[in-house]
Protein backbone atom coordinates (compact mmCIF):
# COMPACT_ATOMS: atom_id res chain seq x y z
CA UNK A 1 0.00 0.00 0.00
CA UNK A 2 1.33 3.43 -0.95
CA UNK A 3 1.80 6.27 1.50
CA UNK A 4 1.21 8.77 -1.31
CA UNK A 5 -1.30 11.54 -0.60
CA UNK A 6 -4.48 11.80 -2.61
CA UNK A 7 -4.34 15.47 -3.64
CA UNK A 8 -1.80 18.02 -4.81
CA UNK A 9 -0.19 20.82 -2.71
CA UNK A 10 1.38 21.05 0.72
CA UNK A 11 0.37 21.23 4.38
CA UNK A 12 3.52 20.51 6.33
CA UNK A 13 3.60 20.21 10.09
CA UNK A 14 4.37 23.58 11.67
CA UNK A 15 5.62 21.85 14.83
CA UNK A 16 6.68 18.28 15.61
CA UNK A 17 7.32 16.85 19.07
CA UNK A 18 8.33 13.19 19.03
CA UNK A 19 8.70 13.11 22.83
CA UNK A 20 5.32 14.34 23.97
CA UNK A 21 5.41 14.45 27.77
CA UNK A 22 1.67 14.92 28.28
CA UNK A 23 -0.37 12.18 29.93
CA UNK A 24 -3.82 13.75 29.42
CA UNK A 25 -5.52 15.35 26.44
CA UNK A 26 -5.58 18.91 27.89
CA UNK A 27 -1.85 18.61 28.66
CA UNK A 28 -1.19 17.41 25.09
CA UNK A 29 -3.21 20.31 23.65
CA UNK A 30 -1.25 22.81 25.73
CA UNK A 31 2.11 21.20 24.89
CA UNK A 32 1.47 21.14 21.13
CA UNK A 33 -0.15 24.57 21.16
CA UNK A 34 2.99 25.88 22.88
CA UNK A 35 4.98 24.82 19.83
CA UNK A 36 2.77 27.00 17.63
CA UNK A 37 3.00 30.15 19.76
CA UNK A 38 4.92 32.72 17.75
CA UNK A 39 4.10 31.05 14.42
CA UNK A 40 3.08 33.71 11.87
CA UNK A 41 -0.07 31.72 11.05
CA UNK A 42 -1.34 32.05 14.65
CA UNK A 43 -2.85 35.50 15.09
CA UNK A 44 -4.25 34.99 18.62
CA UNK A 45 -2.56 32.17 20.55
CA UNK A 46 -4.69 32.63 23.68
CA UNK A 47 -7.97 32.42 21.74
CA UNK A 48 -6.71 29.42 19.77
CA UNK A 49 -5.85 27.47 22.95
CA UNK A 50 -9.16 28.35 24.59
CA UNK A 51 -11.09 27.16 21.53
CA UNK A 52 -9.05 23.93 21.31
CA UNK A 53 -9.84 23.15 24.96
CA UNK A 54 -13.53 24.06 24.52
CA UNK A 55 -13.78 21.83 21.44
CA UNK A 56 -12.09 18.95 23.27
CA UNK A 57 -14.54 19.34 26.18
CA UNK A 58 -17.34 18.46 23.72
CA UNK A 59 -15.71 15.07 23.09
CA UNK A 60 -12.42 13.57 21.95
CA UNK A 61 -11.70 13.52 18.23
CA UNK A 62 -9.96 10.20 17.72
CA UNK A 63 -9.49 8.30 14.46
CA UNK A 64 -8.49 5.16 16.31
CA UNK A 65 -7.29 4.07 19.72
CA UNK A 66 -3.84 5.36 18.71
CA UNK A 67 -4.55 8.61 16.85
CA UNK A 68 -6.30 11.79 18.01
CA UNK A 69 -7.03 14.84 15.87
CA UNK A 70 -8.02 17.72 18.15
CA UNK A 71 -8.97 20.72 16.07
CA UNK A 72 -10.65 24.09 16.09
CA UNK A 73 -12.13 26.24 13.34
CA UNK A 74 -11.19 29.67 14.48
CA UNK A 75 -10.42 33.29 13.69
CA UNK A 76 -7.20 32.82 15.69
CA UNK A 77 -5.29 31.37 12.70
CA UNK A 78 -4.86 32.73 9.17
CA UNK A 79 -4.13 29.39 7.45
CA UNK A 80 -4.35 25.73 8.37
CA UNK A 81 -1.79 24.98 11.07
CA UNK A 82 -0.67 21.52 12.10
CA UNK A 83 1.28 20.42 15.18
CA UNK A 84 2.05 16.73 15.63
CA UNK A 85 3.03 15.02 18.85
CA UNK A 86 4.03 11.42 19.43
CA UNK A 87 3.95 9.72 22.81
CA UNK A 88 5.86 6.58 23.67
CA UNK A 89 3.64 5.88 26.69
CA UNK A 90 0.25 7.08 25.43
CA UNK A 91 -1.99 10.03 26.23
CA UNK A 92 -5.38 9.58 27.94
CA UNK A 93 -8.06 11.24 25.80
CA UNK A 94 -11.12 9.47 27.21
CA UNK A 95 -12.28 6.05 28.43
CA UNK A 96 -12.49 4.72 24.86
CA UNK A 97 -9.08 6.18 23.92
CA UNK A 98 -6.83 5.82 26.97
CA UNK A 99 -3.49 5.47 25.17
CA UNK A 100 -3.21 7.77 22.15
CA UNK A 101 0.23 7.60 20.50
CA UNK A 102 -0.14 10.30 17.80
CA UNK A 103 -1.80 13.67 18.30
CA UNK A 104 -2.39 15.84 15.24
CA UNK A 105 -3.50 19.26 16.49
CA UNK A 106 -5.11 21.35 13.75
CA UNK A 107 -6.20 24.96 13.56
CA UNK A 108 -8.39 26.00 10.64
CA UNK A 109 -9.44 29.50 9.58
CA UNK A 110 -13.20 29.98 9.68
CA UNK A 111 -13.29 30.69 5.93
CA UNK A 112 -11.39 27.50 4.98
CA UNK A 113 -14.15 25.00 5.79
CA UNK A 114 -14.31 23.35 2.35
CA UNK A 115 -10.54 23.01 2.12
CA UNK A 116 -10.43 21.68 5.68
CA UNK A 117 -13.17 19.08 5.14
CA UNK A 118 -11.50 17.82 1.97
CA UNK A 119 -8.14 17.64 3.73
CA UNK A 120 -9.61 15.85 6.79
CA UNK A 121 -11.35 13.32 4.56
CA UNK A 122 -8.02 12.52 2.90
CA UNK A 123 -6.26 12.43 6.27
CA UNK A 124 -8.81 10.00 7.71
CA UNK A 125 -8.43 7.73 4.69
CA UNK A 126 -4.63 7.86 4.98
CA UNK A 127 -4.56 7.17 8.72
CA UNK A 128 -6.72 4.07 8.30
CA UNK A 129 -3.72 2.53 6.56
CA UNK A 130 -1.76 0.33 8.98
CA UNK A 131 1.37 1.10 6.95
CA UNK A 132 0.99 4.86 7.39
CA UNK A 133 0.21 4.53 11.11
CA UNK A 134 3.19 2.28 11.74
CA UNK A 135 5.52 4.53 9.75
CA UNK A 136 4.50 7.56 11.82
CA UNK A 137 4.68 5.72 15.14
CA UNK A 138 8.04 4.12 14.38
CA UNK A 139 9.96 6.91 12.60
CA UNK A 140 13.27 7.00 14.49
CA UNK A 141 13.86 10.77 14.47
CA UNK A 142 12.40 14.11 13.40
CA UNK A 143 13.88 14.02 9.89
CA UNK A 144 12.51 10.52 9.23
CA UNK A 145 9.16 11.62 10.69
CA UNK A 146 9.07 14.66 8.36
CA UNK A 147 9.80 12.37 5.41
CA UNK A 148 6.95 10.06 6.38
CA UNK A 149 4.66 13.09 6.82
CA UNK A 150 5.54 14.34 3.34
CA UNK A 151 4.51 10.94 1.97
CA UNK A 152 1.36 10.31 3.95
CA UNK A 153 -0.10 13.57 5.31
CA UNK A 154 -2.66 14.69 2.73
CA UNK A 155 -1.83 17.71 0.68
CA UNK A 156 -4.00 20.77 0.15
CA UNK A 157 -3.74 24.00 -1.82
CA UNK A 158 -2.26 26.91 0.15
Image (cartoon, rainbow, N blue to C red):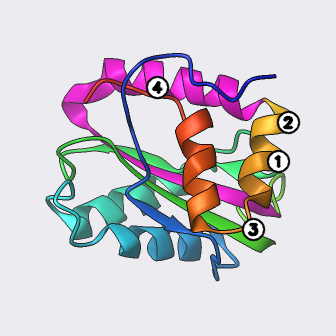
Residue at which label 1 appears: 134
Q: Is residue 21 visible?
A: yes
Label annotation for residue 119? 4
Q: Which residue is drawn at 57% across and 71% down?
A: 28
Q: Residue at x 75, y 68 (%)?
A: 92
In the rendered image, the vertical position of residue 95 relative to residue 77, given as above or below: below
In the rendered image, the vertical position of residue 111 relative to residue 57, given as above or below: above
Residue 124 position, x and y percent, is 64, 28
Closer to the chain start, of discs 3 and 1, is 3
Residue at which label 2 appears: 130
Q: Nearer the viewer, residue 55 or 70?
A: 70
Closer to the chain start, of discs 4 and 2, is 4
Tell me the quarter of the picture where residue 158 sits: top left
Q: Which of 131 and 110 is in front in this view?
A: 131
Q: Nearer the viewer, residue 98 or 155?
A: 155
Can you tell which of label 2 and label 3 is closer to the viewer? 2
Q: Looking at the image, do the residues carrying marks 4 and 2 touch, with CB atoms under 8 Å apart?
A: no
Q: Residue at x 23, y 41 (%)?
A: 79
Secondary element at tag 1:
helix
Secondary element at tag 4:
helix
Task: Give the crowd class for mark 1: few <14, some 14-19, many >=20 residues within 10 Å.
Answer: few
Closer to the chain start, of discs 3 and 4, is 3
Amino acid sequence: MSLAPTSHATVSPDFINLRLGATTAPEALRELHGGLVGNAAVDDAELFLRQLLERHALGANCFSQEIAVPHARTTAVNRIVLAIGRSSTGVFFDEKNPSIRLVLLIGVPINAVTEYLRWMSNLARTLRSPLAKEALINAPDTEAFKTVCSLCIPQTKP
